[in-house]
Image (cartoon, rainbow, N blue to C red):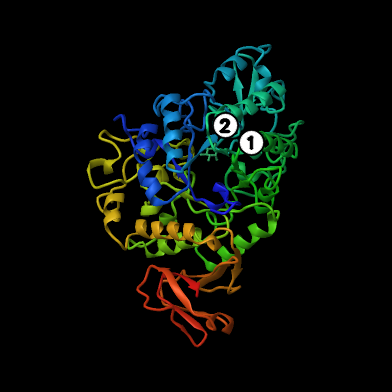
Amino acid sequence: MSENWLWWKDGVIYQIYPRSFKDSNEDGIGDLQGIIGKLDYLADLGIDAIWLSPINPSPDADFGYDVADYKDIDLKFGDLGVFDLLVAEAHQRGIRIILDLVLNHTSEKHPWFVESRSSLDNPKRDWYIWRSGSDEGRKPPNQWQSVFGGKAWEYDEQTGQFYYHMFTRQQPDLNWRNPEVYAEMMRIFRFWADRGVDGFRLDVFNNYFKDAMFRENPTKLGVRAFDRQVHLYDTNQAVMMEVVADIRSILDSYPERYVVGETFLADTKMTASYCGPGKFHAAFDFYSLIKTPWNPARYLRAIQRQDEELPVEAWPIHVFNNHDNRRIATRIRAGEDDEKLKVAAALLLTLRGTPFLYYGEEIGMRDIHVTRSEIQDPVGKHYWPIPVGRDGCRSPMQWNDEPLAGFSTVKPWLKVHPKFPTRNVASQHENPRSLLNFYKALLHLRRSYAALKGGIFIPLNHEPQRVLAYVRQDNDNRILVALNLARRRSKLAVGGEITRYKWEVLLSNKERSQSQFRKGWLELEGYEACILRQL
Ligand code: GLC
């Protein structure tokens, strides 16, 4: 490994939604012991780090994203002892652990909030955002809306004031302007870093601060009330930059720690502004892949936009799936043969930047269809049927064809996808042409060729119609990636500069006897992902 090897830069990060990965104690909910039992699977897959969605104690109004204690583990997942074991076992296999810290808000059941709401003069009162109402106290202090539905202000009878919540009313926002809150938040980073945690994913970090004067947002057209505001005053406040620097300096006092921010309501430019030396290592630009439609020109533009906006020293990340969005297989209506998904996988894993995978992506899991009475997600409960909520992408991992897909032996908290008997890890493991084995091959390739990690990115065509093609290059290798996003055969025009050399096929999801450059063209089968190396 070269001296510059940095696990978060060269590695691939795998997100686990712990409730849905593997249940070891037969309560229908996944847990840490379940994850420990699957570490060999993850090591064999070839990932470098795991991001765990929140595992702190939580009443689950938003499934872990409403935390009741930042320094403990929820009993349904295990305890600190099992967590330490998970960290040790993961480290033994060269896998790092990234925790999800939800520091914008707590659960309403967090002892801090219980105290805070108890009286106007409670010492914790100012730990949250309390305001008197307007119009003799009956109307909310301003017109801010909650993204999960309804007004962002909740009236509390006990003290006759309103508290602010950007998400559900069970998730009151903390007051980051209070120095005690601030200090406590910084202690949370140290608590987990001291325990050996390698990195943090910061939930909606750019929401920590709101306008000090609580000015009203300008309005615009939109469907939901939340979308009918320009979020000028309830998010992305300039003061956040100081916190970004403080968090980074805490993490830099430990070796090789990583922080990735989840931006909320931020475009590529805003997202990029939080990254770089002295700032976060990375932040999610959801406009890169997850929000971009299946179109080569659109992907290319999104990728280049991210590169243009990021400071030179910063590092991009790429992601197709997470626990808040429909799975890519469902979004792009991938056929059951998974060939289209292989093209997506090849794109994700050959770009310059850190790829994030989401559990089950490697076997092409599809969203489950949830009926109204089955809805668990607060977003679905509020808005159904548009949108239906986020349960679809959170169904139990499909391990094998045993009842309940080998996830659990009792009814799981969310149902298993009905096609699990044919779509599961065990069956794909056996099939050399499966999506799972294609992911493995790609991950292996990424590990073998540094050009696929740190190499520069050179697009081969600028207005691609069907084929997205680029070269990744470092001092040792030149690798050409050609992705046919169309169902039909397509040709890629390649200049003499490319055809002058001999190329070997490193990987393709189609039968290829040779690289087949003919008269300046590379021919590709429908949904072919082809990776070549210059000899
Ligand atoms: C983030 C999480 C999402 C959660 C919300 C509130 O967007 O990804 O799942 O509901 O924050 O914490």
Q: CA distance from mark 2 to mark 1?
A: 8 Å
**In the image, is residue 148 above or below residue 346?**
above
Q: Are marks 2 and 1 in contact (CB under 8 Å)?
A: yes
Question: Which three-letter amino acid code belongs to the residue tagged 1?
Answer: Leu
Residue marked by disc 1: 251
Image spot of residue 431 (x, y percent): 28, 59
The vertical placement of 299 against 314, above or below, is below
Q: Is residue 138 visible?
A: no
From the viewer's perspective, is residue 199 above or below residue 366?
above
Q: Which mark is residue 379?
A: none
Q: Earlier in the sequence, mark 2 or mark 1?
A: 2
- Identify the residue under disc 2: 193
Residue reaching furthest to the left: 402
Q: Position of residue 353 (x, y in %)?
A: 57, 55
Left or right of 390, for residue 305: right
Q: Amino acid at mark 2?
A: Ala
Nearest the viewer among 20 and 367 is 20
- Horizontal arrangement in the rendering, residue 19 relative to residue 325 (left or right): left
Please give the name of the residue rendered at 54% of the width and 53% of the height, measured from the top-left corner.
Answer: 10
Q: Position of residue 138 (x, y in %)?
A: 66, 22
